[in-house]
Image (spheres, grey):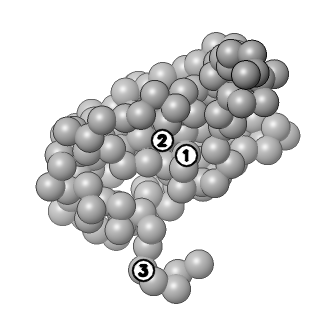
């Protein structure tokens, strides 16, 4: 029998590796779904400071609300321009953030831009790109968790996946 493993020790070969698949770093979790401990650990850095920003989906009904939530909750730098390109730039290069990893949690994600499907799609693309930016040269790795009511989880997952053949 081998030595016990420590899932938080990055030198332990049995420890869960941080996911490199962007889909694993952009997740939808329904309110009633349990999160396995290994999955929870995979959202966190092995060591170092973690920046957690919890955004309120109810305050993100329009584009201005989306930018305001990101500006306030993530404490975006003063040079954030309040547009999609600026948000994309800020989230894909978090070198300005005093942390080794960033976890963005959007509570009530089903309410985000619910009446604005085009803008909602743009936001999900920006979040997917941010979650896919894992190269150390890019900066701080980002994980995004979209929390929603159980009856919205399937639709949100389908929206994030995009239309069939979109890749």
> What percent of the width, then of the height, locates residue 153?
26, 55
> Which residue corresponds to mark 3?
163
Mark 3 / mark 1, whichever is N-terminal = 1
Q: Is the C-beta separation of discs 1 and 2 under 8 Å?
A: yes
Residue 164 visible in image: yes
> Please, what secondary structure does the residue beneath circle 1 have?
helix
The residues bearing labels 3 and 1 have C-alpha atoms spaced at a distance of 19 Å
For the residue pair 43 and 98, the one nearer the viewer reads as 43
Tell me the element at label 3.
loop
Residue 89 seen anywhere in this rendered image of the structure: no
- Give the labeled residue for mark 2: 144
Q: Residue furthest bottom?
A: 165
Residue drawn where x is 37% and y is 27% of the image: 54
How many discs appear?
3
Image-based side of 135 in relation to 100, left or right: right
Q: CA distance from mark 1 to mark 2?
A: 6 Å
Question: Could you tell whether 81 is left or right of 27 in the image?
Answer: right
Q: Residue at x 73, y 22 (%)?
A: 1
Q: Residue 145: percent from the left, percent from the top?
A: 42, 40
Which of the two marks, 1 or 2, is nearer to us in this view? Answer: 1
Residue 29: image quadrant is: top left
Which quadrant of the rendered structure holds the C terminus?
bottom right
Q: Residue 146 at what x, y percent from top left?
A: 36, 44
How dense is the environment of label 3, judged by Cα within 10 Å: few (below 14), some, or many (20 and up)?
few
For label 1, the residue is: 25
């Amino acid at each position: 029998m081998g030595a016990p493993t420590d899932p938080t020790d990055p030198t332990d070969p049995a420890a869960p590796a941080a996911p490199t698949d962007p889909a694993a770093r952009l997740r939808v979790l329904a309110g009633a779904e349990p999160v396995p401990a290994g999955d929870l650990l995979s959202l966190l850095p092995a060591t170092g400071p973690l920046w957690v920003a919890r955004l309120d989906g109810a305050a993100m009904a329009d584009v201005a609300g989306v930018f305001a939530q990101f500006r306030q909750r993530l404490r975006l730098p003063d040079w954030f321009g309040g547009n999609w390109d600026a948000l994309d730039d800020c989230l894909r290069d978090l070198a300005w953030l005093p942390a080794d990893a960033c976890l963005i949690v959007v509570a009530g994600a089903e309410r985000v831009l619910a009446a604005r499907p085009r803008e909602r799609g743009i936001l999900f693309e920006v979040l997917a790109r941010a979650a896919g930016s894992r190269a150390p040269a890019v900066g701080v790795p980002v994980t995004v968790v979209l929390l929603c009511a159980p009856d919205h989880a399937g639709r949100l997952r389908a929206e994030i996946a995009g239309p069939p053949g979109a890749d």
